[in-house]
Structures are given as structure tokens and as C-alpha cells.
Amino acid sequence: MEEFLDQIRNDHHNFDKGQISDHVPGEPFDFFHDWYKQAFEKGEREANAMVLSTVDGEGKPSSRILYLKELNTQGFVFYTNYLSRKGREMNENKHAALLFFWPGLERQVRIEGKIEKVPAEMSDAYFASRPRGSQLGAWASYQSQQLENRSELEERIEKLAAQFPAEVPRPPHWGGYILVPEYFEFWQGRPSRLHDRIIYQQDKTGRWDIHRLNP
Ligand SMILES: Cc1cc2nc3c(=O)[nH]c(=O)nc-3n(C[C@H](O)[C@H](O)[C@H](O)COP(=O)(O)O)c2cc1C
């Protein structure tokens, strides 16, 4: 363990894979598109995995990883159980944050904004496109609630498979959310920890104010 901790302490990773010039896109979505595409093209593993941080009604934060499933002109869409811990927290507090980390490119993107549920038809369409196993799983898993043992879950799956021999309807407690951004930070690692940080902040008229932060 000591040896391992020493290794962490002595790892002075030098970031040198890129930079952000002063000429950046006027729209943060365009910037995000460019970086997202590059993450895929460079073979970044799990490029669409992101950390979602939520805050409950008492102001306590919590984080977990989710998959980004759609990016449209409004924001960032993901799917989950509406009754899960994150679901309950987003019900109590609409403010949330997303974080993408693409280590191969030495980049992170921080996004903050407000959460809305996506229209039911959109959740229906995405649910219908999922493999049958995941569809049954969405019914069987009371996500984030205590489970007595593994077989309780497996028995529920068996029953549901018999109940829905063909098409599996979308459970009412399962669907999409969209995070509508008000704030973006694009971070590119640079040598000597002198990283580039570009902020897009939306003003009251909806215009994006762009500025740079100290590393
Ligand atoms: C790579 C990865 C992708 C995940 N994608 C999702 C997802 O798209 N939706 C989801 O509900 N949980 C996903 N999870 C599981 C969540 O991290 C989390 O365990 C679960 O949603 C329960 O979170 P909660 O108790 O905060 O509600 C993923 C986990 C990992 C590691």
C-alpha cells in the first residue's frame, strides 16, 4: 500500500496533447460537438460516459456515471429510473451538473444547468429501441432501493418475462431527462499545470458570454 501511495504522490503527469486558442466557437454546443467527435475518433473508451451530480432538498450532493444518449439543440439527454436516488434528488432540486473526462485527449468538460423530463413519446421511442433484457430490467429493478438478495431480482425477471412474452411496454417510472445548460467549461491540460479553461455562461437574454479562467 505504501509503495502504491508513493507512486501516486510521485506521478507528475505532464499534459501536452493540445491547447485552446483564443479563437473559439461562438456557441458552446458547436465546441462540444467538435470535442465529442474527436473523443470518438481518437478511440476514447466510453466517450459518452459522464458524471451526473445532483443535489437533494437539503443541499447534499451525490454523483454517479451515466451514458449520454442524445445531444440536441436543447441539451444533454440521459435515461434512468425516475424513482431512483438521482430521480428523487432531481425532483427536489432541478439544478444539476455533468462532467465528461476524456483522458486520452487530456480534456474535461463541465456543464451546469437545469433538469427537465423529456416528452413521454421520446422515452417510448428510446425504450423500444433497447434490447429485451434491458427492457425487462427496467421493470424488475427498483433502482436504488434495498434488495434482499440477488435471487429476489432474478425471480422478478422470470415473472416479467412470462408477463410480457412479446413486446415490453415502457414502465411509467423509467424515462429520459434533459439537462439544459447554462454554463460550460472546456478544459484542456497544458504543461506545468498551466491549463486552458474556457467558460461559456448564458446571460439573461440567452446570449453566451465567453471568457477564460486561470488554470
Ligand atoms: C459506464 C456506466 C454507465 C451507466 N449508465 C447508466 C445509465 O445510462 N442510466 C442509469 O440509470 N444508470 C447508469 N449507470 C449506473 C449508475 O452509475 C448508478 O449506479 C445508478 O443509476 C443508480 O444511481 P442513483 O442511486 O444515484 O440513482 C451507469 C454506470 C456506469 C459505470
Image: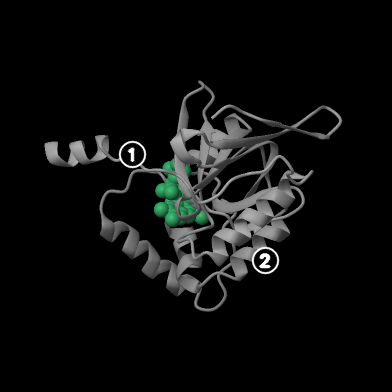
Residue located 55% across and 49% down the image: 18
Q: Amino acid at mark 1?
A: His
- Choose top left, top right, bottom left or bottom right for residue 210: top right
Is 88 above or below relative to 172?
Answer: above
List the single residue furthest toward the left: 2
Residue at coordinates 45% horizontally, 61% vertically from top-left? 45
Using the image, tell me which numbered label, if any, was put on residue 56: none
Amino acid on which disc 2 is placed: Ala
Q: Percent x, y for residue 199?
A: 67, 34
Q: Secondary structure at mark 2?
A: helix
Taking 94 as reference, is 52 above or below it?
below
Q: Quadrant of the C terminus?
A: top right
Q: Is residue 35 above or below residue 19?
A: below
Residue designated by label 1: 12
For disc 2, does the CB lie below 8 Å from ligand 1?
no
Residue lying farthest top? 58
Task: Name the residue: 49% across, 65% down.
Answer: 43
Q: Is residue 97 above or below residue 124?
A: above
Instruction: Pick the quarter of the image with the N terminus.
Output: top left
Of helix, strand and loop, which one carries label 1?
A: loop
Return the mark for residue 125.
2
162 lies left or right of 179: left
- The answer to which of 140 and 30 lies nearer the viewer is 30
Q: Is residue 133 visible?
A: yes
Residue 188 location (% of width, % of height): 55, 43
Q: Position of residue 121 (x, y in %)?
A: 72, 60
Residue positioned 45% across, 70% down in the render: 133
* Pointer 2 local density, CA inside 10 Å: few below 14, some 14–19, many at least 20: few
